[in-house]
Image (spheres, coloured by chain):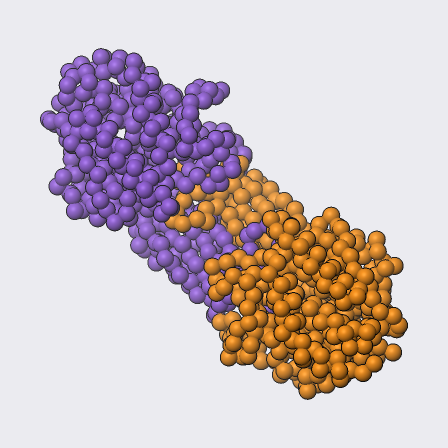
Chain colours: A purple, B orange
């Protein structure tokens, strides 16, 4: 089964592939907001139908949250499992979008054509690169190049609560030789990458309660405890003056970077001034004694993702609020244990609670960091296939983001994962005006066709 | 002109007076939110019509914001000016109200009958006590007991931006011998009070901007500056470990309490344990070396009234936000200068801004503290009238709240103000389920009738 006609078919069918992607993008499958439950379901239905059209045995599988999509097809070694997610991030602040986030469109930009809309890069555009490669392969050769399982979830943007239980219950069905995950970026606009180390995550909300109700700050101010002040102190104390995180034992299990990886990263043309300049910043924050790439790929972090309390409307309301809340997430590396970090965070908060203020921790969840075996020959084969498609040597890189699924595949199914994606740093995922370059979509499909040809025996 | 038949008429007409109050309460005149502009206007119209019905020459007077209501009536000394405000606080969080805040009703409670609804205590219920006393006096005697000007504003809950300009433009018309302000509380459920010292206020919003857009905390976390962390540090640093406020020069002009006032306050049966216990607290916060009444009445404060940034919806969104905002107010005492405090606050923020974070201060406004001459015989006459109505010795007290109008009357019109109100500490003004005791309304009307009889010559 030859590769060239598959690539030609992908080139010729680009417009049809885009039409399919647009249909999927128009479904507002925001998983974190219960209002969009039916839309998450609709996205799963759409994918089941599309995979069945290619010849997969596909089904929607219920969970306590949003459904999984599981599909089986092909024969022969290796058995590859492909993972992606059909859910997307919320779209607020909506007023910062130039267009309806769920009315995707192709735009000309100074950096080439892009597909604009929520989910274009994270992750609908990416997952469709794999599905389109499958479709072209079957159309050309009448069968898939090897045994392939497709596994798509709908809760990636909301902490994946159903993922591990589902994997455990269906371990026999899902276990393959190697997983392929398409939810990462190119190293830069020209250099493709396989992500081989990923930060983990521990996320929690902390809700402080002081007085039983909001008080008039004139009548009570100076005598009654203000929970916003307590929360500010808790947040301010998360880092010391050098940018180090202060939780007890936080750095337990954080490895120093091996010399060979440090050398390889120093060889990468990472321009942190440009990277920060693109978002209006000029100075690296964080740990004072670490390089920018270390901070992003191999150092743990603590970031407040949201904070609120008291009166937040127009004008003034001189209230002394009853409650103050923050959403906080920690990016983890090496062998940092999410449960230990959670405990240390709870202690950090409780140590700073004055009498009369109580704390609740309703939402803790996490996943450890993970690292892939770059000496596995499949990794090198895939790296060469990527290099051929892009005309540039592909890199093994780290990622600051957390894709907990990679760790779960290792821990639950004993299977390594190859993280290959075609997003760019400026895709504005999780932000208004998310986009995916048309080149990413087109060369992404072609990349998967090449990788399958390289891996199928 | 005798007092007794006026009091009898107020008793007999209580139900009709309540009907009028309910009609005014049903108008949602929230001044801080532009959505309710027409409702503020409607409340002013209602009051003009009601005052005209009593025989006042009353009119609605335009301002760049919500209108003033000015009315003139009566002859003879002294010339009294009565002030109240027809605007009310916002009602959020609406879900914490047991009933529609603008569908007022009488409720039986363990502490007696109350009128429940937004504005019942702050300030519509209070201002109507004065108007009802006028109505009864005119009905009984055919004329007011002395020359009376009524001056009602609609921006008290939103910083009174039009007040001083309007007073300056209409100084001749508004200047009287003495102002009467009904916007304060009883000392406790049984002891009436005249408030003779009031804290001032300086309120400001601070908006921090870091990155130009919200970022993915995985992709940027550890390298990009998070403005929530910067804001938390700014808020945490407002107070030192002893509860003192750290702004440079903040305590300039803060007087120590005179010994005689300290002695009088020590004689008041203020139970801070009960006061705090009513709102679920047990420990005094704030300056460690001050008594509870000092903290509330004669010490300055810094309170964050609202804070927000990043993702505040359901679920998690691992965003590193572009902006973080806080609304902060300072209660001022003695000769503290609001403009100097504003400058010191701006410096406090700017000293804590790392490179790459900018701050905006869009909303600063303030008023100094004020103190009334308790040796003026009119104050003693009013105190005795109050004592007779309530059957308990009335007290000269301080107030933690800021009623900037009292200072403006002194500074712009050279006129002292007598602050007499009938609210209670548990009225939940500025909170859900605001109420005003029926006894406050009834004895309030009677109190004004007595005070007018005592002051009219």
B57 lies above or below B322: below
Residue A312 position within the rendered picture, expressed as x and y whole percent measured from the top left: 55, 52
Task: Report the residue at 71% width, 82% height from top.
Answer: B8
Could you tell whether A15 is left or right of A79 in the image? right
Task: Report the residue at 59% width, 46% height from top.
Answer: B207
Q: Quadrant of residue B138?
A: bottom right
Q: Quadrant of residue B209?
A: top right
Residue B287 appears in the picture as rendered: no
Q: Quadrant of residue A39?
A: top left
Residue B327 position within the rendered picture, expressed as x and y whole percent measured from the top left: 59, 53
Task: Report the residue at 21% width, 41% height from top.
Answer: A61
Q: Nearer the viewer, residue A283 or A400?
A: A400
Could you tell whether A147 is left or right of A18 in the image? left
B231 lies above or below B407: above
Q: Nearer the viewer, residue A82 or A376?
A: A82
Q: Residue furthest left?
A: A76
Q: Nearer the viewer, residue B450 or A189?
A: B450
Task: Report the residue at 65% width, 46% height from top.
Answer: B362
Could you tell whether B438 is left or right of B56 in the image? left
* Labels in figure, total: 0
């Amino acid at each position: 089964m030859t590769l060239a006609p598959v690539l030609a078919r992908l080139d010729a069918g680009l417009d049809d592939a885009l039409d399919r992607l647009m249909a999927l993008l128009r479904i507002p499958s925001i998983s974190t907001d219960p209002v969009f439950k039916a839309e998450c379901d609709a996205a799963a239905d759409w994918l089941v139908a599309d995979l069945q059209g290619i010849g997969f045995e596909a089904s929607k599988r219920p969970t306590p949250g949003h459904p999984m999509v599981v599909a089986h097809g092909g024969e022969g070694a290796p058995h590859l499992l492909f993972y992606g997610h059909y859910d997307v991030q919320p779209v607020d602040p909506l007023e910062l979008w130039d267009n309806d986030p769920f009315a995707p469109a192709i735009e000309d930009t100074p950096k080439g054509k892009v597909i604009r809309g929520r989910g274009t890069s994270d992750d609908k555009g990416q997952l469709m690169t794999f599905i389109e490669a499958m479709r072209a392969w079957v159309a050309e050769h009448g069968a898939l190049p090897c045994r392939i399982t497709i596994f798509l979830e709908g809760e990636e943007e909301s902490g994946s609560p159903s993922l591990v239980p589902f994997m455990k219950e269906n371990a026999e069905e899902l276990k393959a030789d190697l997983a392929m995950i398409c939810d990462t970026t190119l190293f830069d606009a020209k250099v493709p990458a396989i992500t081989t180390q990923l930060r983990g995550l521990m996320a929690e909300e902390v809700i402080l309660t002081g007085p039983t109700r909001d008080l008039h700050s004139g009548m009570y101010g100076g005598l009654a405890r203000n929970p916003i002040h307590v929360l500010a102190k808790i947040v301010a104390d998360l880092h010391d003056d050098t940018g180090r995180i202060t939780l007890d034992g936080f750095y337990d299990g954080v490895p120093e970077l091996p010399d060979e990886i440090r050398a390889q990263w120093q060889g990468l043309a990472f321009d942190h001034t440009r990277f920060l300049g693109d978002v209006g910043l000029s100075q690296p924050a964080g740990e004072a004694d670490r390089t920018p790439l270390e901070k992003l790929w191999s150092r743990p972090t603590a970031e407040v993702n949201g904070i609120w309390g008291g009166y937040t409307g127009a004008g003034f309301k001189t209230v002394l609020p009853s409650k103050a809340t923050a959403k906080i997430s920690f990016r983890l590396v090496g062998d940092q244990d999410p449960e230990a970090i959670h405990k240390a965070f709870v202690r950090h908060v409780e140590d700073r609670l004055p009498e009369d203020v109580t704390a609740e921790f309703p939402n803790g969840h996490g996943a450890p960091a993970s690292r892939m075996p770059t000496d596995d020959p499949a990794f090198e084969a895939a790296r060469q296939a990527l290099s051929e498609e892009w005309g540039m040597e592909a890199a093994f890189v780290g990622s600051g983001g957390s894709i907990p699924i990679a760790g779960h595949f290792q821990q639950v199914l004993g299977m390594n994962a190859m993280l290959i994606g075609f997003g760019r740093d400026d895709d504005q995922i999780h932000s208004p005006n998310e986009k995916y370059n048309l080149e990413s979509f087109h060369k992404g499909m072609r990349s998967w066709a090449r990788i399958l040809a390289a891996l199928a025996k």
